[in-house]
Image (cartoon, rainbow, N blue to C red):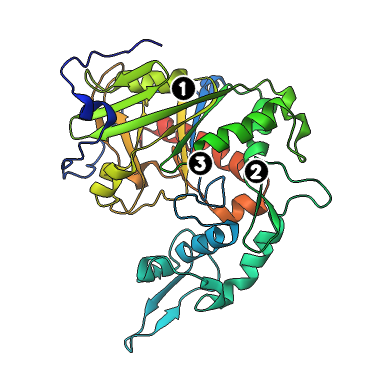
Amino acid sequence: MAEMTMDGGHNARDHDGTDTGDAPQTLCREPPVSRWLWSSNHERKKKLILHIDLNNTILISDTVTTQGTVAALEYFLTTVTWGRMSREGNWEWLSDSPSLQPPCDGAVSYYSQFGRVMGFTSAAGRCFRRILDQHLDLLLWPNGIKGDRELAVKGEDGRLYHWILPSFFQLLKDLVQEGREFAVVFRTFGGDLPRVLRAVFRALNEGAHPLFPELSDLSLKVNMALGKIRCNKRGIVLTRDEDRVSTRNGERGLYQYLSSVQGLGGFQDHFEWWASNTFSIRGGKPFWVDPFDQSVQHIFIDDNIRQNDEDTIVHPKVFLDPDGTETRMACTSELYDITLVQTDLLQAISDLSYFTQRVHICLENYERNLQQGEV
């Protein structure tokens, strides 16, 4: 695809997004009165674009932090277990069950209080050790089957695990069986994208997955080219192979590009931009939503999507007019479980249909909110 906008005056720093100047300080404002119109008979005809994070969403390991399967799952547990500091300065648990949302006012996650810790379930979080062990057992590579070089990974405990969650492959299978047109766009800050694309290619083209040998019959293509999305205070640039799209002339071109993708592929997002914006919504992975588009629905699935806009990873940008180029920043809570899905990693491990169910919930909520004019 040829470049969709003219960027004649931009220098090299603009192209790779290394200028991480201050972003606007305005957070999301109340949405304007909606003019979204929809008819329920369009729902099954829409093309789905699923933006899917990697680490702690469909992978349980992290090359950036060098965490293996056990450590990565322990880390996730610190983000979904809740307590508070007592007046005496001691940590006290407020719930004995992990949850994405705090169980009560005043509860904070163990991670928020103490940051990354080693050996969580062997020390302060020992009461959650049983949960860790149960989900590690569910992740085990099938007994008696040789580990695949891309699809399996050896954990720190010496056992062989699935590298990509089986529930992700079940999602692909389910969407094809439902007759849906869809594409998957992997969106990650880390460096795992090349291996993920190779692994998915093996599963979809060579029938290499022991639980899903029939995936090669789905006729899903994998784009092996590594894309990049880079941001700075002047705009956003997306590149992949010869493709280059920017916000120079508005944001419509980027939305159209992502709406047109086919099969499975991926982009590395701009971690430094997120960090320079204090890990808030302002510097998150850009994500365009067009409520006037009756042919496409975008859904973003990421474990770091949170309803606290000062601590979330996706930057939702909602178009203001049909065919317009201007957007507004939407609060995470406005689009939560509508176009934004916060991954519950424990559920994604234990329930093979987890991702399929979350997509269905988003489709239903999106449709209902459009019809009621509430989004």
Which image quadrant for residue 375? Answer: top left
Please state which amino acid type lies under the numbered disc 3.
Answer: Asp
Residue ranking furthest to the right = 144
Which image quadrant for residue 243? Answer: top left
Q: Earlier in the sequence, mark 3 or mark 1?
A: 3
Task: State which mark lies toward you, 3 or 1.
Answer: 3
Tell me, yes or no, if residue 78 can be seen here: yes
Q: Residue at x 55, y 73 (%)?
A: 121
Q: Height in image: 333 above or below 346?
A: above
Task: State which mark lies toward you, 1 or 2.
Answer: 2
Residue 232 placement (x, y as % from top left)? 22, 34
Residue ranking furthest to the bottom = 88
Task: State left or right for residue 283 relative to residue 159.
Answer: left
Task: State left or right for residue 23 relative to residue 274.
Answer: left
Label 2: how many residues lie within 10 Å, few (<14), some (14-19) or many (20+)? many
Q: Earlier in the sequence, mark 3 or mark 2?
A: 2
Please state which amino acid type lies under the numbered disc 2.
Answer: Ser
Tell me, yes or no, if residue 292 can be seen here: no
Q: Which residue is mark 3?
A: 192
Q: Secondary structure at mark 1?
A: strand
Q: Nearer the viewer, residue 237 or 327?
A: 237
Q: Earlier in the sequence, mark 1 or mark 2?
A: 2
Residue 38 placement (x, y as % from top left)? 44, 23
Q: Residue at x 53, y 65 (%)?
A: 98
Q: Where, quadrant-wise, is the N terminus in this rendering? A: top left
Residue ranking furthest to the top = 2
Q: Which residue is mark 1?
A: 296
Q: Which residue is mark 2?
A: 167
Q: Secondary structure at mark 3?
A: loop
Alpha carbons under labels 3 and 1: distance apart: 28 Å
